[in-house]
Amino acid sequence: MWKLFDKRRDQECYILDYHCYKPTDDRKLDTEFSGEIIKRTKNLGLLEYQFLLKAIVSSGIGEQTYAPRIMFSGRESCPTLDDSISEMEEFFHDSIKKLLDRSGISPSEIDVLVVNVSMFASVPSLSSRIINHYKMRENIKVFNLSGMGCSASLISVDIVKNIFKSHRNVYALVVTSESLSPNWYSGNARSMILANCLFRSGGCAILLTNKRALKHRAMFKLKCLVRTHHGGRDDSYGCCIQQEDTQGYLGFHLDKYLPKAATRAFVDNLRVISPKILPIRELMRFLLVTLVKKKTSSQQSTKGGAISSPSPKPVINFKTGVDHFCIHTGGKAVIDGIGLNLGLSEYDLEPARMTLHRFGNTSASSLWYVLGYMEAKKRLKKGDTVLMISFGAGFKCNSCLLEVVRDLGDENVWKEDIATYPPKTLTNPFLEKFGWIRHEDPSTFNVDNYLNL
């Protein structure tokens, strides 16, 4: 029994540190420059301009997000291989170095490397480029993930967690980002130009270990992780997919079925993780309320009396087992939907909303920017729990529960901005700058006149 208990202690998954990437200021994407990018996309007309204006105004994204360098040289429609590689290496060389230097760990001490970048794959792989640059050792275990979408960072953490079950005293490095340089859509299909508005540059490097001697240095302890995959459903599989449009332009299609697919995956994921993270008393309360409601409804239908308006469905109170909610910044609608389904307050949703405003949707790394906001605001205290929720193409919903090991208060990637957040208003100036487009008449609108403004 002691051996089993002792073995289990060496299988715990601790997050020692993480570092979110902050690109240089010359890559900031403000309103003025966003308009310039739209102007040089020749295949767009008035209806597409009006659609994009509505999408960006309601997106919740501010003026200080970052774009890849290719956008500033005006070559987004004709990227080269070097553009994609240099975008990734700029992140790798900055964030991984800062993370390892701060942790006092040499690259040669890393036992496991997991890299996830969904929309770009090179030969040699991106993980090989990291190993070459940092001269990591020959027997390092390497995993290079692609195509996993915005939920990929928790998939990477799950891989590390499973490795920890069979290997003692291990350091693992997870590197999560997205390559935007080769993925600009130059067509005019509404379901595909939307992705141009939402995604921004970012990335995160995370250092994990199962060394029990380092548990007091750790920031978080992974309590549980649940992955839900609805790839077997055709409608879920096709609602978020990379494809060519009718004109042959490659882009990322976001189907109108996406909200329904996300809701269904989210509900199925919650069914599995709820018993793992909530106290027995809350689960029993929910069960009793559900049974009483079913019995009452059954009695009313048996008596054949007048049917009253349906009462609200019983709701689980996740706050009984979770202190903080770290939500993927997929968009304002995603944050609002999760908040509504879980009964969260604006205080609970603030980290996700502020991250979306400041950094945009940085794909799989967005969760860690949200976590950084909580830390910078000194919300995370020893013993607190954090529920991470992410969605990704496939369609996937992944979630995990973290326990805060010690009081945290580093301002991290938010250092220069945290004092100004939350701002008085999240309204971006796009409507003020380009609102006149809404009133243009399609029969008299001249694209060339707009391009000359």
Image: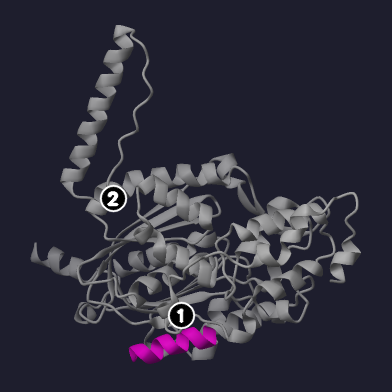
User: What quarter of the picture does the C terminus occupy?
Assistant: bottom right
- Local crowd size for mark 1, using a 10 Å CA cut-off: few (<14), some (14–19), many (≥20): few
Tag 1: amino acid: Asp
Rendering quarter of residue 313: top left
- Towards the viewer: 47 or 369: 47
* Real-space CA distance between mark 2 and mark 1, rounded to the nearest whole angstrom: 30 Å
Q: Residue furthest left?
A: 2
- Local crowd size for mark 2, using a 10 Å CA cut-off: few (<14), some (14–19), many (≥20): some
User: What quarter of the picture does the N terminus occupy?
Assistant: bottom left
- Boundaries of the magenta span: 92-105
Residue 38 horizontal/vertical position (percent): 76, 67
For residue 416, above or below residue 242: below
Disc 1: which residue: 417
Disc 1 secondary structure class? loop
Rendered residue at 81%/50% (across/down): 246
Residue 171 appears in the picture as rendered: yes
Residue 19 appears in the picture as rendered: no
Tag 2: amino acid: Phe
Main secondary-structure element of the magenta-colored stretch: helix
Residue 26 horizontal/vertical position (percent): 63, 86
> Horizontally, is 10 left or right of 346 in the view?
left
